Image: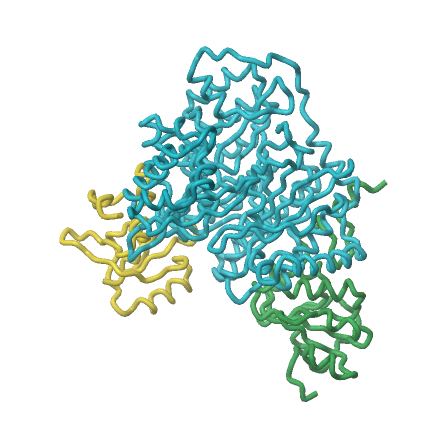
Amino acid sequence: MKILTGNDLRSGAVTWWNGNGWSLFVDDAVDVGDEAEEILAREVATRRVNVPYVIEATIDAAGHVRPAHIKDRVRALGPTVRRDLAVPTADKTGWDWVI
Amino acid sequence: MADNLGTSPDEVQFRFRDDEPVDHGTVTVDACCDQTNATAVRIEPGDDARLLLPYLDRLALVEVNFPGFGDGRGYSSARILREAGYTGELRAVGDVLIDQLSHMRRCGFDSFAPDKRLDEDDALRAFATWENVYQRAADTRRIIADKRHEA
Amino acid sequence: MYQYDSYDQAMVDARVEEFRDQARRRLDGKLTEDQFKPLRLMNGLYLQLHAYMLRVAIPYGTLSGGQMEALADIAEKYDRGYGHFTTRQNIQYNWIKLEDAADILADLSRHEMHAIQTSGNCIRNISADHFAGAAADEVVDPRPYAELLRQWSSFHPEFTYLPRKFKIAVIASEKDRAAMRLHDIGIRIVSRDGEVGAEVYAGGGMGRTPMIAPLIRDFVPIDQLITYAEAALRVYNRYGRRDNKYKARIKILVHELGAAEYTRQVEEEFAHMLAVGVEPPREELARIAAYFAPPAFVDGPKTLDRSDPDFALWVDRNTHRHKHDAYVSAVISLKPAGGIPGDATAEQMRVVAKLARDYSFDELRVMHTQNLLLPHVRIADLHAVWSALDAAGMGAPNMDTIEDIIACPGLDYCSLANARSIPLAQRISESFAAKGRTEVVGELKLKISGCINACGHHHAGHIGILGVDKKGKENFQLSLGGSEAEDVSLAKITGPGFDEDGVVAAVETVTDVYLGARQDGERFLDTYRRIGMEPFKEALYGG
């Protein structure tokens, strides 16, 4: 599926498009189908997100969203070398799939 | 007059001169070097400003074009002309942004015709950003080091 | 140490307010991200993988204990309790909010620090020999010249939109401890017939096209240094390539024109600039130099009690000869085996600050190797210093060994990276430490970059590792034979890349080849230069 991600303009935090706003949790990301460009243009204009982009992702049976590219997987969880600083996530197996 | 290059006085948003602005278009650097009567010329980023040095006496307006704000060659062009003694109008045109105004002023620009009009308050604040300066430029301001060592 | 006068302070304060206004305009939507980006970058603010990142300048790597404490306070107040020291003697914070950035800059300004021009296509923080003012072999202290250049380059009206970033390093000894010839301009302060001047190199750099800077002038009289720099920069600003970001650094211009032609153009511009007159008054250099007068060294013991072998090892590894024989410079390792190279917690920064105050005339240095340094420690105080460092996890006796790895933040933090650098550094340092091989191998500079931009200096590593993306997987290219020192050279790739486990094993393999082949007193680099690449290739890839 296609999901949207960017950084919050004010805080810089990694965010994911959840259908009506931007969430800190990758599992909240929703499939935007072919509406990516339209949503991105609108959201950039209202400055709810900074430099957002569309990426490929999959969703597993338990509902965990997994970005396709390693860079976005690292963004979803946090630095692999500082797991104490990780983004809280429902996905306990997160570190198993990030790399 | 047929020349469609150049900005008109109406497009100039900020001007730090008292003389009457040139009211006709500009020619390219090549054309300026070829013809003997041009009084207004437009420098593109890739042009060598030093080609104009023999003609400075007859020039009343030099426009330096910034097609993109990130291309800084025009700052050198401006300073080179001022170092050579050019006293006519030096106009920054194109993608000129608020946060570049104070540096452009220091490089010798004395008029500004940005593609998009700038917020007046923000721009006036930007012109006044630096009460003092560290390095010599075309504006002949006394630099901090001069002030530190004045008798 | 240099101290701001009211002018310097006003300049930095004006910059803070300028940035505060720029950030406001961005948040109000008056600036697009494209327009704001170069402005925030020129104040050290990046947007990285997880948040904004702020790079704070530590000019020529020198700071006081109080400044280090201010950095610790920022780490706790605005970040997550730590910072990362970089190869250009800066510190980076990884978890910054845009809405806090102006306040952080204001906090820095109160301690005579800033983040000015730590990024962007402008003249960056001026770096210098980290042993400046202490090293026994320096001609003069290079820092006054670096400070003169810092002021000249700050908010330079003509050189703020250069084709690409521009880095300057200044040294003043035959030994090069600042990777001087891998900078856009490298300056060696020299003395000729009693007159001080500058030897100038131009067009060095790493990145995707590494180049060693050629000499472009063997002596610039010191009272013409700024004029010469102005000329060198103007030629670059006018003729550096702007059609291709990857060919925009000055090294490409110097390479394409040839050093002789670039030099000719600079000389022409230099003659013109001398006539225009851009040099600051002569007294300014003397004014700056007075701040760097040597502290009041006192005589004391020149030998120490070596009965504790751990202490003796640390002294042998981590101290450097000082110009005063009762003192040494002591390296504070930010490379604990298995740790993250260059990271320090706020608590560690405070320990270091206190040591500086108690034992080093309140002076600290950031080294380009991502370590810290107490420049002036009495030999009599070394044991106390070592004990405190050891207790705080900064006493690893590993300077210039295979544990002293330079690593960029890599894909764990950096939006440009293709692969992670830090985990490799952790595995390699841990493995060599655990097996007790570090001392056996001796001096070996290992440098790891997570992408082609080479922030981890892999081209200059005795062993270099470059992380690349191979069909969505991390892959690592190994290279051998680089050096950033006075024997500068660029490393050569061994052959096909490795996965993470493979490259860790490969590092072990090449050190085995070295140990098997080395002759008396040879470093890894010396052996490599003598025997060449083949034996290493053979061991790595077979026949």
Q: Position of residue C177 (x, y in %)?
A: 56, 37
Position of the N terminus of chain C, as image quadrant, is top right
- Residue at 35% in and 61% down: A53
Q: Please, is residue C469 above or below residue B25 in the view?
A: above
Q: Position of residue C73 (x, y in %)?
A: 49, 33
Q: Is residue B50 left or right of residue C77?
A: right
According to the rendering, which colour does chain A have? yellow
Q: Is residue A22 visible?
A: yes
Q: Position of residue C488 (x, y in %)?
A: 54, 43
Q: Position of residue C179 (x, y in %)?
A: 55, 42
Chain identifier matching the green colour in the rendered picture? B
Q: Please, is residue A64 above or below residue C112 in the view?
A: below
- Residue at 69% in and 43% down: C148
* Direction bottom: furthest residue: B2
Count how many numbered circles sit on residues in the image. Answer: 0
Q: Is residue B102 visible?
A: no
According to the rendering, which colour does chain C have? cyan
Q: Please, is residue B51 above or below residue B130 in the view?
A: below
Q: Which of these two is toward me, C16 or A69?
A: A69
* Direction right: furthest residue: B151
Q: Is residue A72 left or right of residue C236?
A: left
* Direction left: furthest residue: A61
The quadrant in which residue B150 appears is top right
Q: Is residue A58 left or right of residue C348?
A: left
Q: Which of these two is toward me, C60 or C522?
A: C522
